[in-house]
Image: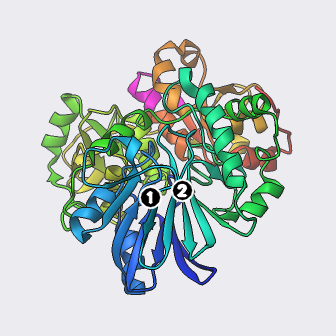
Amino acid sequence: MSDNTTAENTGGIELAAIVDEGLGNSCYLVDLGDGAALVVDPPRDLRAVRAAAGKAGLRIRFAADTHLHADFLSGAVQLGHDDGAVVLASAAGGRRFAHRGLGDGDEVDVGGLTLCAIGTPGHTDEHLSFLLRDGASPAGVFTGGSLIVGSAARTDLLGADRAQELARAQFGSLRRLAGLPAETAVWPTHGAGSFCSAPPGAARTSTIGRELATNPLLGIADEDHFVAQLLGSLGSFPPYFLQLAEINRGGPAVLDAATTGRLAELPVSTVAQLSAEGAVVVDARPVRDYARAHIPGALSIPLRAQFATWLGWLVPADAPIVVVRNPDQDIAELVWQAVNIGVEQVVGELAGGIDAWRAAGRATASTRLLRPEEIGEQHRVLDVRQDTEFTSGHLPQARHIELGSLAQAAHGLTELTVAPTVLMCGHGERAAGAASVLERAGHHDLAVLVGGPADWMQATGRHLETGS
């Protein structure tokens, strides 16, 4: 599992934060003091949640969703089915499954503690924050995608035409939360690594007082200035974000946890046929293994914490997927990451991996790996990092296209045919993905930089350029 779990005690309340490092999100398991637990913003992959509950000897009695998450599928329906948990969510969300609909000011007794719903629209229309009280004393507030550490979540997920309207709602929501007592803990869902726009490197939790002192958005008193600042900070996001809220509204299908982490083993002939019929071969092996030999046209998406994000971003939504992996890679982790963002069309994996493909006499392709000092004047450099990464420092003369936009641009990149091209990112994984996207589009003479800008500076003694 790509999650990590940390425990904290706030005002006598035991709480575990379960962080998905890849998606940049946190869910929370709250000990209600009577052997029961509340889970806030549970993901569909509940393995870490169940492990934390089991370790603490807790039965999950309530599941609360702050909003119709765009970046992962909710596990609330699953908890209702498996555990009999009462699902708490915004009445305005229009969810089409059994839940207790709440509005601004509604309170729920969750076993001696009180959960109070606070209307905090902005990230989404129906967004609620949940203030957890022990008697009259507020212990903390689950802020979902409203107030997050050092920022506020993006407001353009319902379309660019509504981004400004929702940013103004976000302004009011943040001020409302800022009025809570300074010692109130802030427990957001979105955090560093989330494309819902948490600043990189930020802490996962905070307090109202700390945010008032350090969050630059809370220091802006003018609404117009706030809107300009928030909207100006928004980067790109994966296209699957546009589907997940509606799936959550209807309720994701209940999964069989005993069988979900498995895949059918497909013989070479079947994989070749599926590929010829339009299936996407996803090579989940480390970059060096992919570069040495891979199935022609395979997409390189190494299995790591960020696997799901790039799987959802690079593979067409309805395309069947066949996986190539190494024997020591955890297939259950791969499958659970996929279903966590609604990718359920993984039809199987290549039995025997790339060795079986080669043993059957099938052709393979390879991709050259370059060290930073090997980049020469004859090379074109294509940097596929996010905009903010590129503008903060890039190689001189490097061209920039984000990896998520590369497939749409690939056929128009005629300049790649006149000189060898080096793909680069921060470490090499996204660069390998970019090379595979370009190979699928018919480009050749490609190489992947092993490392990133910092490695190039260290190897060459030269400086990076900033800006676009």
List the residue tagged with mark 1: 41
**Residue 443 lies within the magenta run:** yes
Q: What secondary structure is found at the residue carrying circle 1?
A: loop
Q: Bin the neighbour count of mark 2 within 10 Å (Cα to Cα): few under 14, some 14-19, many 20 and up.
A: many
Q: Secondary structure at mark 2?
A: loop
Residue 176 in the image, given as x and y percentages of width and height? 67, 49
The N terminus - image quarter: bottom left
* Residue 235 in view (yes/no): no
Residue at the spot 47% in from the left edge and 53% down from the top edge: 66
Where is residue 288? Give x, y as percent: 49, 51
Image coords of residue 287 (percent x, y) = 48, 49
Mark seen at residue 189 = 2
Residue 140, percent across and down?
A: 61, 67
Judge left or right: residue 213 versus residue 285: right
Query: Dot 1: few (<14), some (14–19), or many (≥20) neighbours within 10 Å?
Result: many
Query: Horizontal placement of 123 versus 354: left or right?
Result: right
Tell me if label 1 and label 2 are in contact, CB under 8 Å: yes
Q: Is residue 431 left or right of residue 467?
A: left
Nearest the viewer among 167 and 99 is: 99
Residue under the point 78% across and 62% down: 210
Nearest the eye: 137 or 25:
137
Q: Nearer the viewer, residue 245 or 342?
A: 245
Residue 172 seen anywhere in this rendered image of the structure: yes
Q: Amino acid at mark 2?
A: Thr
Q: What is the distance, in whole Å, between disc 1 and disc 2 at their CAs? A: 7 Å
Q: Residue at x 62, y 70 (%)?
A: 138
The span shown in magenta is 437-446
Does residue 133 sit above or below 197 in this rendering? below
Q: Amino acid at mark 1?
A: Asp
